[in-house]
Image (tube, grey):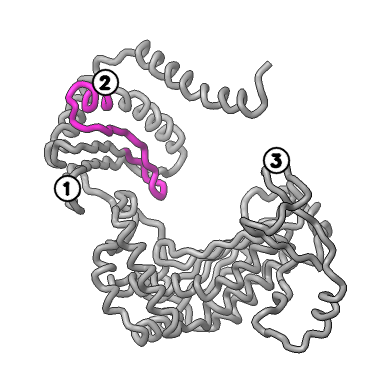
């Protein structure tokens, strides 16, 4: 047995000195009479006990080699679909490169009407908070056993990611999904988690333009916060029952798993969620709002008393077919040429904002670019007019741009981008 005692003050100076931390310490044997008393204690305090056994600690660390040299595994560069039905779609990819006893499983669970309204969206967020609180013990034990575990609410879906020793990965996944499928909140934790959600909504009130372009229906944090005080526990329980009445699950299994083991994981999930499948039209789909030609849409989100932001998004076209590589090259070239003049015009010459930036966006295979200006002096309407003026002048700018100037811009950018790689090499390995 080992007992560690730490204190700021001792009655006498310890005989040993630790030079690195600058502290005195001592190491002594525990008195035998005290050990005897502990063995035959007249009374037991049951609040002091040893932790339960961690069932997620692996006992087998071998690598499956029986199918690793199959032609299908060796020549497969992309995951293959091993399950595809009305309730589930599972992809599988065998690791043939690293050959370590680790595996990863990623799942996203589409629930019924998770974000069809502001109230549903707020209840879904609260459900994830409550679920993570319920799973904190399982997650802690899993992380002690060197598992990486992530539970989040993404695009109206529960996203679950598990990575670790494949020996105990199915067991950990089963424990997590059991709670996802059966958990119901209680009074003692509900109010605490609701207050935690309200704090998160207040602290993350900013709106991302990319989210607005990709979401089929977006409900701001401000609207959810307004409704959060009216979300009662009975409402939450009814919502959870409705939420789990229809599901559709997508997943990926990768690593030191055989195809049979991946299929078995899929069958285990089916047993956990043996309910009506979610209709195709209600499932999540990657989408981007298609802006009509010559559209000039303005969205007024919120205003700060000290900082104003104007952000303009210009949609180009979809990344489809063989021309996408050429489109990507032209897209990158356009950004490289335009970025510096945009900054010089609005920041250096016109002093419109203190932060002026250009960024390229590729949202779900749709090309576009953003021009953003932040100012504490001018309002968004004025900043947008200056951005529009810059865009209107681009045609003349490109007419006056020759091949030699374009090459110089590309060489300068390429040279600048090379410096961080050299710097990393210098500080990591040292240059002789």
Indicate left or right for 191 with 6 as reference. Answer: left
| Residue in the image at 80% along x and 60% along y | 61
Q: Where, by quadrant of the figure, is residue 190 drawn? A: bottom left
Residue that label 2 marks: 398
> Which residue appears at 82% of the width and 75% of the height?
34
Q: Residue 181 location in percent, x, y?
A: 53, 80
Task: Tell me the SS state at disc 3.
Answer: loop
Which residue sits at x=46%, y=38%?
A: 322
Disc 1 residue crowd, few under 14, some 14–19, many 20+, Cα 10 Å: few
Instruction: List the residue tagged with mark 1.
Output: 305
The boundaries of the magenta stretch are 341-369
Is-magenta flag for residue 365? yes
Residue placed under numbered mark 3 in the picture: 20
Whichever of labels 3 and 2 marks the residue nearer the N terminus, that label is 3
Residue 310 left/right relative to 415:
left
Up-down relation of residue 11 to residue 291 (above or below): below
């Amino acid at each position: 047995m080992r007992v560690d005692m730490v204190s700021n003050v001792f009655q006498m100076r310890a005989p040993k000195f630790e030079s690195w931390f600058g502290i005195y310490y001592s190491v002594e044997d525990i008195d035998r009479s005290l050990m005897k008393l502990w063995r035959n204690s007249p009374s037991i305090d049951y609040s002091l006990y040893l932790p339960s056994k961690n069932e997620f600690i692996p006992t087998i660390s071998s690598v499956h080699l029986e199918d690793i040299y199959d032609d299908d595994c060796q020549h497969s560069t992309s995951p293959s679909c091993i399950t595809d039905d009305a309730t589930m779609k599972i992809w599988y990819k065998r690791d043939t490169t690293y050959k370590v006893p680790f595996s990863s499983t990623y799942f996203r669970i589409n629930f019924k009407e998770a974000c069809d309204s502001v109230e549903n969206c707020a209840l879904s967020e609260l459900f994830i908070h409550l679920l993570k609180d319920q799973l904190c013990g399982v997650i802690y034990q899993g992380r002690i056993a060197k598992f990486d575990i992530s539970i989040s609410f993404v695009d109206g879906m529960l996203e679950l990611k598990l990575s670790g020793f494949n020996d105990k990965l199915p067991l950990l996944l089963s424990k997590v999904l059991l709670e996802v499928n059966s958990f119901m909140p209680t009074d003692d934790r509900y109010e605490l988690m609701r207050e935690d959600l309200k704090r998160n909504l207040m602290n993350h009130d900013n709106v991302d333009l990319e989210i607005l372009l990709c979401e089929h229906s977006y409900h701001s944090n401000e609207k959810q916060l307004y409704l959060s005080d009216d979300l009662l526990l009975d409402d939450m329980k009814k919502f959870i029952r409705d939420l789990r009445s229809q599901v559709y699950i997508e997943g990926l299994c990768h690593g030191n798993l055989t195809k049979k083991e991946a299929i078995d994981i899929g069958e285990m999930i089916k047993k956990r969620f043996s309910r009506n499948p979610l209709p195709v039209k209600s499932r999540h789909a990657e989408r981007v709002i298609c802006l009509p030609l010559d559209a000039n849409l303005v969205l007024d989100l919120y205003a700060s008393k000290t900082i104003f932001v104007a952000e303009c998004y210009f949609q180009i076209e979809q990344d489809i077919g063989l021309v996408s590589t050429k489109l990507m090259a032209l897209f990158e070239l356009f950004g490289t040429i335009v970025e510096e003049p945009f900054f010089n015009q609005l920041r250096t010459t016109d002093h419109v904002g203190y932060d002026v930036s250009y960024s390229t966006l590729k949202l779900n295979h749709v090309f576009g670019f953003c021009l953003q200006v932040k100012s504490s002096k001018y309002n968004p309407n004025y900043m947008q007019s200056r951005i529009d003026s810059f865009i209107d002048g681009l045609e003349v700018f490109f007419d006056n741009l020759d091949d030699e100037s374009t090459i110089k811009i590309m060489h300068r950018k390429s040279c600048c981008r090379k410096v961080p790689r050299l710097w990393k090499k210098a500080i990591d390995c040292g240059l002789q």
